[in-house]
Image (spheres, rainbow, N blue to C red):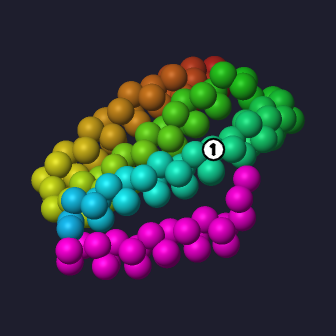
Amino acid sequence: MPSVFQLTSAAVICAVLMLVLRSRSGEFALLLSLMVCALLGIAALRGLNTLLQLMEQLASLAQVDALLLGPLLRTTGIALITGIGAQLCRDAGAGGIAMTLELCGGLCAIYAALPLIQAVFDMLRELI
């Protein structure tokens, strides 16, 4: 996985190029933004397997069912993807679409978290 310095450097270089391109061709600036976001996302995902293994170990130590990690990871992924997509929409001048995407992402995150919420209710029933 690339270092944070490498990822940040690539993002800053892209932002400077976008400033130059935006005045000449806004479409190319948006395409550059999409491309760099995709490449940064792919680079960041390289460490995902290590993170998943660590979370499974932590769940085992805490005596928590590893299946409960799924909703947590899905909810986090939904939030990250929705945030990136919404910001790209704002960069393209589509603020209304960005807001709608954030709303839909929030609803999807709640839906993804339902098994976790159900597990909490089940634990509470056992305590009562």
In the image, taking residue 43 as reference, residue 24 lies left or right, namely left
**Horizontal and vertical percent position of residue 43:** 62, 50
* Disc 1 packing (10 Å; few <14; some 14–19; many ≥20): few
Q: Which residue is mark 1?
A: 45
Is residue 71 visible in the rendered image? The answer is yes
**Horizontal and vertical percent position of residue 40:** 55, 55
Q: Residue furthest front?
A: 24
Q: Quadrant of residue 53?
A: top right
In the image, taking residue 68 as reference, residue 63 lies left or right, namely right
The span shown in magenta is 1-24
Main SS of residues in magenta: helix
At x 37%, y 60%, the residue is 33
Is residue 62 visible in the rendered image? The answer is no
In the image, taking residue 10 as reference, residue 109 lies left or right, namely left
- Determine whether 121 is above or below 16 in the image: above
At x 73%, y 53%, the residue is 1
- Determine whether 58 is above or below 64 in the image: below
- Determine whether 73 is above or below 33 in the image: above
Q: Indicate the quadrant containing the C terminus: top left, top right, bottom left or bottom right.
A: top right
**Horizontal and vertical percent position of residue 115:** 51, 23
Q: Amino acid at mark 1?
A: Leu
Q: Nearer the viewer, residue 62 or 89?
A: 89
**Horizontal and vertical percent position of residue 109:** 40, 36
Q: Nearer the viewer, residue 13 or 110?
A: 13
In the image, taking residue 94 as reference, residue 87 lies left or right, namely right
| Residue 19 belongs to the span the image colors magenta | yes
Q: Nearer the viewer, residue 24 or 15?
A: 24
At x 49%, y 75%, the residue is 13
At x 58%, y 74%, the residue is 9
| Residue 124 belongs to the span the image colors magenta | no
Q: How many marks?
A: 1
Q: Nearer the viewer, residue 4 or 108?
A: 4
